């Protein structure tokens, strides 16, 4: 019984991490159909922002306020990643909306450049980020221990999801985004500045990559290639969930997270990874357009 | 209000609009007629800015807007009801109307669009894509009206719609003409209705104007001659 609960919890925990790293991509790739290979590097930026914040607090803030660095890192990582996303959209992506192959190559190049930049600034070796003290330890229930850091990530992914939902379905700016994604030409004819909407939407997707990077510092050391470790997972979640369906990503992330945990439990880590890939391939044979199908005619 | 000068437009290689000069005066309703495929929709798309012209000018309220984006034109007061309605399928009826507000300065949906089309109030929360064709057409017109346009482009608003809704839509168009200052270009196939609503008509064939006259001077037989296949 305890083993089942623990496996479920680990599945949920992995699912929430996958969701967090895929949410931004569900917007830029899922909604806007931009293949942004630099998405992983936006995650990396979020992680390094957290690292820098930690160092700033270590050096300049009184000891008792140290934990605040992490809370502050989340919005700051969001803003900085969104800003980088905006620059990326404005200088590159907007010329490549109708050319997926070109945007794949170009953003891959940008990703490599950003990695190199991180290497020059922070050095090639991984650096550690000290978790805030309130996330050390865990919640004990009987003989079970649920680490606070994992619980925090689950909570954070829910908060991100709710904010995204609120933005898209309850604000006028979000309504404009949905209108543009459903019928770009007509939205433009009704006075919606589609250029501005593209820029903002891409910035938001990038911003959530930054938040994911911030959360990843809770799980281990970070380095210039942290993004490449996660980009495949992120694309997998979006494709399984259904391109264009934001909430398919939730099902995709939880599904992959859960099966992955189960497979790793009954076999071992590497075989588990192989099995999950096979499962995804089989699944996509059966439902090529993912769990939740929603046609997005975004950029035609 | 609107002047088209030596306008040429088309898709890729094929030229659809060939050298059209056309004028709409203030408060005037201009009807455009012509057989299927002669380029009426293409002309409206060029006026709206969806299709960049190969040659010629679009002059709106004495300024050259030939190079402006559709959103700019919408904000200058041009409302567009396209053929095929182009409703946002996954937005509710109400949200579709709210997007219509983007072009204007109003913050709220005026009650009079619901007076024109009461069904839109009843179906407020439904997805646009779940409405019938006729209801979508009413929504498309209402969506253009909420921003208080000073110039309306209507592309066959009664095409493929059952008679009593056609009636309703024609009443609304007549009412807009009577009660507001809005100028219009209306693409329409029904000569009886055209004679009711228009001040001036143009008949287009093969992308050029082949017949134009003030409505009280038109000769039905001549018009039918151009419209028959
Ligand atoms: N997107 C497009 N790409 C290429 N050719 C097009 C496109 N849209 C229309 N055409 C062609 O341009 C010509 C004019 O089409 P248009 O839609 O303007 O005609 P129309 O007068 O509005 O006809 P209808 O009465 O059927 O609405 C047609 O020959 C059509 O095949
Ligand atoms: Mg047409």
Image (cartoon, rainbow, N blue to C red):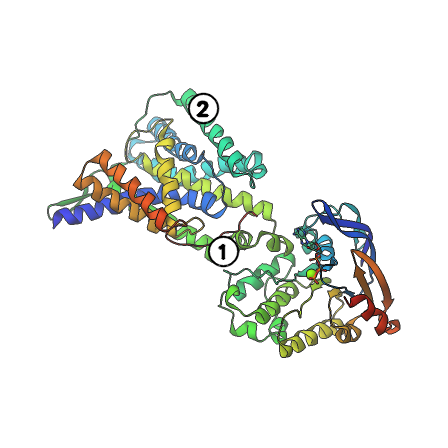
Q: Residue at x 58, y 64 (%)?
A: B97
Q: Position of residue A156 (x, y in %)?
A: 33, 46
Residue B10, can we see it?
Answer: yes
Q: Write down which quadrant ligand 2 falls in.
A: bottom right
Q: Residue at x 48, y 28 (%)?
A: A109
- Quadrant assignment, res B78: bottom right
Q: Residue at x 65, y 62 (%)?
A: B83
Q: Is residue A269 left or right of residue B169?
A: left
Q: Residue at x 56, y 62 (%)?
A: B96
The circle on residue A18 is: none
Residue B28, can we see it?
Answer: no
- Quadrant assignment, res A260: top left
Between residue B220 and residue A138, name the one nearer to us. Answer: B220
Q: Position of residue A154 (x, y in %)?
A: 29, 46
Q: Are marks 1 and 2 on the same chain?
A: yes
| Disc 2 residue: CB within 8 Å of ligand 1 | no
| Residue located beneath label 2 in the image | A117
- Chain ID at mark 1: A
- Contact between marks 1 and 2 (CB within 8 A): the answer is no
Mark 1, Cα crowd under 10 Å, few <14 / some 14-19 / many 20+, is few
Instruction: Determine the residue located farthest toward the bottom in the rendered image.
Output: B164
- Chain ID at mark 2: A
Mark 2, Cα crowd under 10 Å, few <14 / some 14-19 / many 20+, is few
The circle on residue A171 is: 1
Q: Secondary structure at mark 1?
A: loop
Q: Secondary structure at mark 2?
A: helix
| Disc 1 residue: CB within 8 Å of ligand 1 | no
């Amino acid at each position: 019984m305890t083993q089942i609960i623990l496996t479920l919890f680990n599945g949920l925990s992995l699912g929430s991490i996958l969701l967090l790293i895929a949410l931004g991509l569900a917007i830029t790739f899922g909604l806007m159909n931009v293949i942004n290979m630099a998405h992983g590097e936006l995650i990396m930026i979020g992680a390094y922002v957290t690292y820098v914040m930690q160092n700033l607090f270590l050096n300049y803030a009184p000891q008792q306020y140290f934990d605040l660095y992490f809370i502050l890192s989340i919005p700051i990582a969001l803003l900085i990643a969104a800003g980088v996303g905006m620059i990326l959209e404005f200088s590159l992506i907007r010329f490549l909306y109708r050319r997926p192959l070109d945007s794949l190559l170009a953003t891959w190049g940008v990703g490599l450049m950003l990695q190199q930049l991180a290497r020059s600034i922070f050095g090639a070796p991984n650096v550690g980020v000290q978790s805030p003290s309130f996330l050390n330890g865990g919640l004990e229930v009987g003989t079970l221990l649920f680490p606070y850091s994992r619980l925090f990530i689950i909570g954070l992914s829910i908060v991100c999801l709710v904010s995204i939902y609120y933005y898209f379905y309850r604000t006028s700016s979000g309504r404009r985004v949905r209108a543009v994604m459903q019928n770009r030409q007509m939205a433009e004819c009704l006075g919606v500045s589609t250029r501005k909407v593209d820029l903002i939407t891409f910035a938001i997707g990038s911003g959530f990559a930054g938040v994911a990077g911030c959360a990843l510092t809770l799980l281990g050391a970070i380095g210039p290639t942290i993004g490449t470790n996660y980009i495949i997972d992120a694309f997998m979640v979006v494709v399984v969930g259904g391109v264009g369906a934001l909430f398919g990503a939730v099902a995709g992330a939880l599904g992959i997270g859960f099966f992955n945990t189960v497979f790793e439990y009954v076999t071992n880590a590497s075989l588990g990874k192989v099995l999950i890939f096979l499962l995804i391939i089989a699944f996509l044979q059966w439902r090529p357009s993912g769990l939740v199908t929603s046609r997005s005619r975004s950029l035609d | 209000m609107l002047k088209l000068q030596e306008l040429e437009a088309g898709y890729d290689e094929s030229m659809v609009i060939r050298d059209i000069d056309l004028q709409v005066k203030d408060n005037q309703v201009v009807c455009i007629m012509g057989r299927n495929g002669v380029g009426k929709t293409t002309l409206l798309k060029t006026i709206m800015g969806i299709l960049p012209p190969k040659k010629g000018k679009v002059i709106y309220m004495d300024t050259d807007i030939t190079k402006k984006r559709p959103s700019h034109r919408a904000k200058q007061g041009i409302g567009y009801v396209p053929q095929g309605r182009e409703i946002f399928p996954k937005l509710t009826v109400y949200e579709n109307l709210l997007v219509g507000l983007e072009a204007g300065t109003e913050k709220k949906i005026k009650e009079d669009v619901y007076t024109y089309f009461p069904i839109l109030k009843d179906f407020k929360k439904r997805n646009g894509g779940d409405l019938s064709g006729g209801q979508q057409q009413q929504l498309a017109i209402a969506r253009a009206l909420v921003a208080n346009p000073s110039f309306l482009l209507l592309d066959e608003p009664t095409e493929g719609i059952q008679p009593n809704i056609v009636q309703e839509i024609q009443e609304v168009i007549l009412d807009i003409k009577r009660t507001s200052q809005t100028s219009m270009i209306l693409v329409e196939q029904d000569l009886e209705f055209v004679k009711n609503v228009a001040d001036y008509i143009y008949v287009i064939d093969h992308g050029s104007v082949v017949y134009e006259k003030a409505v009280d001077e038109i000769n039905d037989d001549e018009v039918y001659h151009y419209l028959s296949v």
